[in-house]
Image (tube, grey):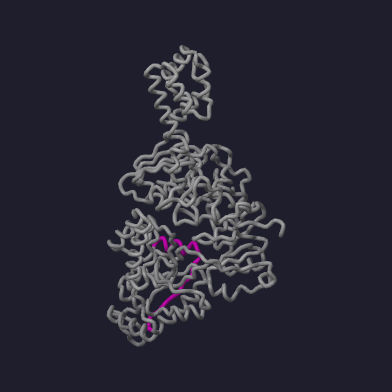
């Protein structure tokens, strides 16, 4: 041992256990150790227990075999306790992942997820189609329309998996500690974690990301991150978050999903502006090429540090991933049929049933599949803006619901492929029991009679074939974001015109449509809400009074009901899965009773068509297909 300082092994050992920097090891402690080992001439024993694999046993033997001063004996005994707490046995009951409810499915002994092929070959390229345009590669700011595929270049503290309702596993964070009441969480960063420029990911980057997203990130990020009462770096690779009033069961989960930004790159730059200059990133892919608004190409990072971690093994198999943009879906479909696009997800059951008839499918060069899933489908419908008359009157909304003939539309427009939505969480256990929801009568004649009675009760009578109230005609506009939606809107228009109601249908491009929706400048629109198997704080942005009065939220109808506010808030606070399901069903029942939309359709399947030699795993998780798990059969190209 050095006569002036503790040896490097001991200094490192002390640093790890005391969470200190190497230069901060207490000088007095070092002096005591030096004095005792020199006095007893036990340098060999000292070196033995420092280098031994069984440090605890050797250290206890040393303490019992020597005559030590009280300060040193106390210090070394405390060190034994710390060592025990750091052993795998001491943490045997600590979950490897972080689950919203219950225990995680996977453990540290698992090497890959159940729905991937861990031996999937790497290589090849895949091209997807996208609609519209893009003007930014920052998906976390409000401004601009982000490019497709940016999830491939941004890593998060922990990674979500798709065969559990809501569970996170180590990614940038190697380990987490969560308070029993979920009032705090500590992230220990993997020392191997790197940005694409080779620089290490540190606690400073995590804290910078937190502060930046809290002030300039998406609305849900801002709302959740503001619940943190204190965020601090406790070591170069450790960050602790303490939560203040208003936190719930889900808050630590949202923090674990935090994307980590490069402080070196973003400091001094405007985060809330659109940008097409790739920042320093850290995901399994990097941005290789951008043709603004038309195409973006990602390139797999060959030396990606996290490639073999549990949530990544068997994923991210293509060397290059490209998104080509088209002005509308019809053009994109033709590009797929000609082979310019390699894979297509179809969302129109009518097209799926009738339009997928082209040579490549018939001769086996391409394939189409219906793949069942168990996730909630999109809650799609004709959404009323209750901020405006006449849709502020629930009698009018009920009347319109009666007038939409789903059975005719499903048979004639969608070849009978769909089921009627009867929930805001269709295709899942979260949906309120069917019998709890008052559905419309089944005969068309009865529907029209009931609709007429409701409209008249609301003051809308018929004069000269027109529905009027106080001399003003009942007329409104249906706002659409794609020409493909016109056929069902026209069907609805014909039904309404029979009742003397004047309807204008307007189709906008994606940018104009988004602008109108952000300002809630519409009468009725055909749109949707997306939910997961673990709904949480996003429900506050979907249904509450606060969201109804703030621009660019997802409370499109303008719902403002104290009971709905309370139910939406209760979901993320649910302590068990059973309680979450119960509260979500209660919320669903209340929303359906409010007639805030005319529910449309869902299938319970993913419609996917792709060209060979693309291949996929045989297992499909509960959330449906995970395209990141697919690969290219190199020998079949």
Can I make out residue 558 in this image? no
Q: Quadrant of the C terminus?
A: bottom right
Determine the image quadrant of residue 339: bottom right
**Residue 136 x, y percent position in the rendering:** 52, 52
Q: How many marks?
A: 0
Task: Point out the residue furthest to the top here.
Answer: 39
Q: Nearer the viewer, residue 452 or 513?
A: 452
Residue 507 to residue 91: above or below: below
**Residue 374 x, y percent position in the rendering:** 48, 64
Residue at image position (65%, 55%) is 125
Residue 158 to residue 565: above or below: above
**Residue 184 x, y percent position in the rendering:** 37, 43
Q: Is residue 504 magenta?
A: yes
Q: Is residue 105 magenta?
A: no
Determine the image quadrant of residue 569: bottom left
Residue at image position (45%, 42%) is 92
Residue at image position (55%, 57%) is 115
**Residue 221 x, y percent position in the rendering:** 41, 50
Determine the image quadrant of residue 306: top right
Q: Nearer the viewer, residue 443 or 3?
A: 3
Q: Nearer the viewer, residue 463 or 438?
A: 438
Can I make out residue 532 in this image? yes
Residue 82 to residue 391: above or below: above
Q: Which residues are magenta?
A: 499-519
Q: Nearer the viewer, residue 153 or 71?
A: 71
């Amino acid at each position: 041992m050095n006569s002036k300082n503790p040896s490097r092994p001991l200094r490192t050992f002390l640093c790890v256990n005391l969470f200190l920097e190497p230069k901060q090891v207490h000088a007095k402690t070092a002096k005591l150790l030096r004095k005792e080992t020199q006095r007893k001439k036990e340098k060999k024993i000292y070196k033995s227990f420092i280098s031994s694999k069984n440090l605890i046993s050797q250290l206890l033997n040393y303490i019992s075999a020597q005559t030590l001063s009280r300060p040193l004996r106390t210090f070394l005994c405390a060190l034994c306790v710390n060592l025990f707490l750091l052993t795998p046995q001491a943490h045997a009951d600590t979950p490897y992942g972080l689950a919203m409810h219950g225990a995680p499915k996977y453990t540290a002994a698992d090497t890959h997820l159940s729905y991937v092929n861990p031996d999937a070959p790497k290589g090849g390229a895949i091209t997807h189609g996208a609609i519209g345009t893009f003007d930014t590669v920052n998906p976390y700011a409000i401004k601009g329309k982000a490019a497709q595929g940016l999830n491939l270049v941004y890593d998060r503290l922990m990674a979500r998996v798709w065969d559990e309702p809501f569970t996170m596993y180590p990614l940038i964070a190697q380990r987490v500690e969560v308070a029993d009441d979920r009032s705090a969480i500590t992230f220990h960063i993997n020392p191997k974690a790197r940005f694409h420029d080779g620089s290490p990911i540190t606690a400073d980057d995590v804290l910078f990301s937190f502060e930046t997203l809290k002030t300039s990130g998406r609305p849900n990020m801002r709302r959740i991150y503001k619940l943190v009462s204190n965020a601090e770096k406790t070591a170069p690779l450790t960050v602790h978050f303490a939560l203040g009033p208003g936190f719930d069961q889900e808050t630590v989960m949202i923090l674990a999903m935090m994307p980590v930004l490069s402080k070196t790159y973003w400091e001094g730059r405007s985060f809330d502006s659109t940008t097409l200059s790739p920042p320093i990133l850290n995901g399994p892919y990097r941005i290789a090429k951008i043709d603004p608004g038309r195409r973006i190409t990602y390139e797999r990072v060959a030396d990606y540090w996290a490639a073999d971690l549990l949530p990544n093994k068997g994923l991210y198999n293509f060397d290059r991933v490209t998104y080509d943009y088209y002005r509308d879906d019809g053009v994109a479909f033709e590009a797929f049929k000609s082979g310019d696009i390699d894979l297509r997800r179809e969302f129109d059951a009518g097209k799926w049933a009738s339009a997928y008839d082209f040579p490549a499918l018939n001769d086996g060069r391409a394939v189409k599949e219906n793949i069942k899933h168990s996730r909630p489908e999109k809650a799609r419908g004709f959404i009323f803006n209750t901020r405006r008359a006449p849709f502020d009157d629930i009698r009018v909304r009920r009347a319109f619901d009666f007038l939409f003939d789903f059975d005719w539309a499903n048979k004639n427009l969608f070849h009978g492929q769909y089921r009627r939505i009867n929930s805001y969480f269709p295709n899942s256990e979260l949906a309120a029991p069917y019998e709890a929801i008052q559905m419309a009568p089944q005969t068309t004649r009865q529907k029209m009679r009931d609709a007429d009675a409701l409209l008249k009760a609301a003051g809308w009578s018929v004069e000269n074939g027109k529905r009027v109230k106080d001399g003003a005609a009942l007329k409104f506009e249906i706002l659409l974001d794609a020409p493909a939606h016109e056929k069902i809107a026209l069907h609805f228009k014909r039904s309404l015109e029979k009742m003397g109601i004047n309807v204008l249908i307007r189709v906008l491009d994606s940018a104009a449509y988004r602008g109108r929706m952000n300002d809630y400048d519409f009468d009725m629109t055909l749109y949707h809400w997306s939910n997961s198997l673990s709904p949480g704080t996003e429900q506050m942005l979907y249904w509450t009074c606060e969201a109804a009065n703030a621009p660019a939220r997802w409370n499109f109808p303008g719902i403002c009901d104290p009971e709905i506010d309370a139910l939406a808030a209760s979901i993320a606070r649910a302590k068990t899965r059973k309680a979450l399901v119960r509260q979500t069903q209660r919320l669903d029942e209340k929303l359906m009773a409010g007639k805030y939309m005319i529910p449309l359709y869902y299938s319970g399947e993913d419609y996917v068509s792709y060209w060979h030699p693309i291949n996929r795993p045989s297992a499909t998780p509960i959330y449906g297909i995970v395209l990141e798990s697919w690969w290219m059969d190199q020998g079949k190209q």
